[in-house]
């Protein structure tokens, strides 16, 4: 065992010893994981929420990091849990403990790292409690469903001193990094405008469906958690939770955090001076979704403005791309997306730049970066630390708040508040079902 590994285990044990759970069922030995499965030279992973991105994150982490092993899986849908347990054994020859309650997974001493792939409204509670339990955390984006939750999550990471990586994996793609290097060379001249957009042609309408009985094997009460109690409706469950305010923020936060993140990173910006938004359900006004299918948002940062646009059922976005970031300068425009980047020159103001294509796997790189930081204890090397995730999630939440209020909002970064009381009421989430927002 390496010295870094010994330090890692010792620190995790010290933090775990200072925190207890109300539920204290012993973990692996009661769920079929024998002591012989434990490998002292491996970073042990537990994954919470494994139907979608949580499962993708786990697969990427195991494939890209030979020094990791999955020791626990958790999901409130026992059907998903059974399937993923079988997939894990088939694809990786690993057997993991199975949990329906994430708190029992966090109480499992055979876990070093936790992946959080649950719906957005759960991220804050689970990330904070994972840090309290001494676990390092890989949390899906957006990190939270409100501005206040973002603040709480940053405070928790700082207090408990855990490695927390946000799933904004574009930060680990080589071509995204090279685009920023070119941007910061100054060759584009003064950047006055940055455009970000997601035109999602695959997203069609969501037909209205009646409420129905909770599917067998699903603990719906646990799925709702701090969200408002409602009867079960299939439209709100699994993937489509994204389009309902109780659980998420629509395309503004789902795709927006990826693209707005790189706009802010490229411009070295955090807090806008003001934000306004206009849009609505213009493609499918009568379908089941709540969040806008069409939205335009304008942020004023003083030295430049940033635009966010999204549209369902349309693929033809800016510059012929269905998603991207465009840094528009006096000498030229740099257009960046997941496939690569190019520069469109402004007349003869600058030399032609050869187009750069994607060459690597950003998600694989991102998980390696995270595991390397866990092993080294140097959290400053994280590509997307919780602070970065909080910055962009907050900016995207501002856009949704401007849309909901219909106002042009001014932001005071010193007080962390808007100039309008109606907007400030939307900063803090309302927790239900006896759940409370953590206080750090």
Image (cartoon, helix red, strand yellow):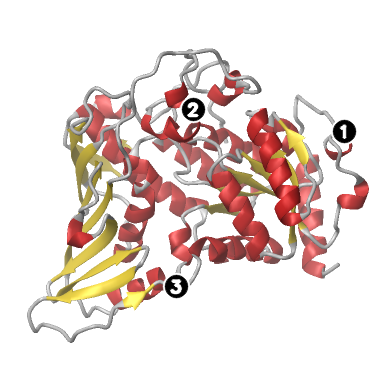
Work out whether residue 11 or residue 170 is closer to the camera in this orientation and state it.
170
Q: Is residue 346 visible?
A: yes
Report the residue marked by disc 1: 30
Q: Residue at x 77, y 43 (%)?
A: 16
Between the C-alphas of marks 1 and 2, the distance is 30 Å
Choose the circle earlier in sequence order: 3 or 1.
1
Report the residue marked by disc 2: 237
Badge 1 density bin: few <14, some 14–19, many ≥20, Cα 10 Å: few
Between the C-alphas of marks 3 and 2, the distance is 35 Å
Report the residue marked by disc 3: 174
Choose the circle earlier in sequence order: 3 or 2.
3
Choose the circle earlier in sequence order: 1 or 2.
1
**Secondary structure type for disc 2:** loop
Q: Residue at x 22, y 65 (%)?
A: 327
Q: Is residue 345 left or right of residue 258?
A: left
User: Relative to 31, is 4 above or below?
Assistant: below
* Residue 98 locus on image (x, y percent): 75, 36
Work out whether residue 144 or residue 82 is closer to the camera in this orientation and state it.
82
User: Relative to 96, is 279 above or below?
Assistant: above
């Amino acid at each position: 065992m390496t010295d870094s590994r010994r330090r890692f285990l010792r620190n995790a044990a010290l933090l775990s010893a200072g925190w207890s759970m109300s539920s204290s069922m012993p973990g692996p030995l009661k769920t079929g994981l024998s002591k012989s499965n434990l490998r002292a030279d491996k970073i042990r992973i537990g994954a919470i929420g494994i139907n979608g991105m949580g499962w993708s994150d786990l697969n990427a982490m195991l494939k890209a990091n030979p020094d990791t092993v999955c020791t626990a899986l958790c999901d409130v849908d026992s059907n998903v849990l059974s399937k993923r347990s079988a997939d894990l054994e088939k694809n990786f020859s690993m057997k993991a403990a199975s949990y329906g309650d994430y708190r029992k997974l966090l109480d499992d001493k055979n876990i070093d790292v936790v992946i959080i792939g649950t719906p957005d409204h759960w991220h804050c509670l689970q990330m904070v409690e994972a840090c309290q339990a001494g676990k390092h955390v890989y949390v899906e984006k957006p990190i939270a469903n409100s501005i206040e939750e973002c603040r709480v999550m940053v405070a928790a990471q700082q207090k408990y001193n855990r490695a927390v990586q946000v799933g904004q994996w574009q930060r680990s793609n080589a071509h995204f990094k090279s685009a920023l290097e070119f941007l910061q060379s100054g060759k584009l001249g003064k950047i006055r405008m940055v455009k970000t957009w997601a035109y999602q042609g695959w997203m069609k309408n969501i037909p209205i469906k009646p409420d129905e009985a909770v599917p067998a094997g699903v603990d719906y009460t646990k799925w709702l958690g701090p969200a408002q109690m409602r009867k079960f409706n299939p439209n709100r469950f699994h993937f489509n939770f994204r389009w309902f305010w109780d659980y998420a923020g629509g395309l503004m936060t789902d795709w927006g955090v990826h693209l707005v993140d790189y706009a802010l990173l490229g411009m070295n910006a955090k807090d806008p001076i003001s934000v306004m938004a206009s849009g609505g359900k213009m493609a499918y006004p009568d379908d089941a979704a709540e969040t806008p299918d069409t939205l335009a948002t304008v942020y004023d940062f003083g030295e430049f403005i940033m635009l966010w646009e999204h549209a369902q059922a349309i693929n033809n976005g800016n510059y012929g791309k269905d998603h991207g970031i465009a840094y528009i300068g006096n000498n030229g425009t740099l257009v960046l997306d997941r496939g690569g980047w190019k520069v469109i020159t402004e007349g003869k103001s600058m030399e032609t730049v050869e187009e750069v294509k994607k060459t690597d796997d950003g998600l694989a790189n991102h998980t390696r970066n995270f595991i390397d930081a866990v092993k080294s204890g140097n959290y400053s090397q994280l590509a997307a630390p919780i602070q970065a995730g909080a910055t962009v999630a907050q900016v995207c939440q501002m856009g949704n708040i401007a849309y909901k209020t219909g106002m042009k909002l001014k932001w005071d970064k010193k007080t962390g508040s808007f100039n309008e009381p109606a907007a400030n009421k939307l900063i803090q989430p309302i927790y239900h079902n006896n759940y409370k927002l953590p206080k750090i």
